[in-house]
Image (spheres, rainbow, N blue to C red):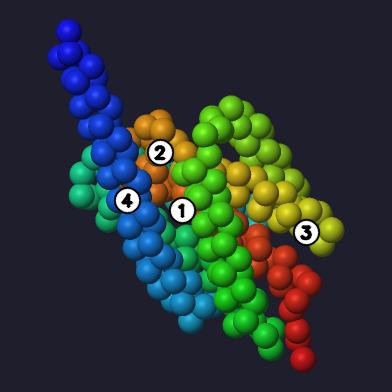
Amino acid sequence: MSQYPQNAFETVSTAAVARNRVLRNTYWLLALSMIPTVLGAWLGVQMHFSMFAGSPMIGFVVFMAVAFGFFYAIEKTKNSGLGVAVLLGFTFFMGLMLSRLIEYTLGFSNGGSLIMTAFGGTALIFGAMATVATVSKRDFSGMSKWLFAGLLVIIVASLANIFLQLPALQLTISVVAIAIFSAYILFDVQQVINGGETNYISATLRIYLDVYNVFVNLLSILGIFGGNRD
């Protein structure tokens, strides 16, 4: 009679160890992914890279095609070491895409300070959301539908603003995006903790995109309100 409870305890313990391993590997790979992102951004600034310089709409279509190509490749290789290489290649590409904003921000006399402030703010948001996901007993899985709906609204509004070029709309998009992707950090980290995501490469991809979008939109807001051209 005592054998079943013991086996059940061992099963639960093994599952907890596996979840902790996935979370640990996710955090390590997330940290590693920052290196190609920075390299891509640096190279993009040196090359004055811009995928949207000619036609913003065509640039957006090309960006989405490349991004979803990477998503497909990462999904296909996520159970092998090649998946790590493909993910790091994607983060390098995202660094290139970040370079236009970085170069614009560096045009401010306090551009370097704004970038470091955005980096620090993003780190604080990530730390806070990851901590809540770790210590909270609340199940945040019910947020998924609302977060996805909010994401769709951001995409549609961003596409519209390519043509409208309204600063007020851009500011609104950035504020809402920070809120949504901060919540996505909470959701995605808890998915790993609760065993909803068992592959660390997939988990890293999702959390990386959350962090990336928080940084981009926070830096955009700081540029609007704190950029100094003197």
Residue position for label 3: 171
Q: Residue 24: which disc?
A: 4
N-term mark: 2 or 1: 2
CB atoms of marks 1 and 3 within 8 Å: no
Question: Seen in the image, is 115 located left or right of residue 176?
Answer: left
Q: Position of residue 151 (x, y in %)?
A: 64, 40
The amino acid pointed to by label 3 is: Leu
Residue position for label 2: 193
CB atoms of marks 2 and 4 within 8 Å: no
The label nearer to you, 2 versus 3, is 2
In the picture as drawn, the residue positioned furthest to the top comes out as: 1
Secondary structure under badge 2? helix
Q: Name the foreground residue: 101 vs 18.
A: 18
Between marks 2 and 1, how big is the CA–CA gap? 16 Å
The label nearer to you, 2 versus 1, is 2
Q: Is residue 54 visible?
A: no
Q: Name the foreground residue: 108 vs 181.
A: 181
Q: Is residue 227 visible?
A: yes
Q: Residue 192 occupies which quadrant of the picture?
A: top left
Q: Residue 208: which disc?
A: 1
Between marks 2 and 4, how big is the CA–CA gap? 10 Å
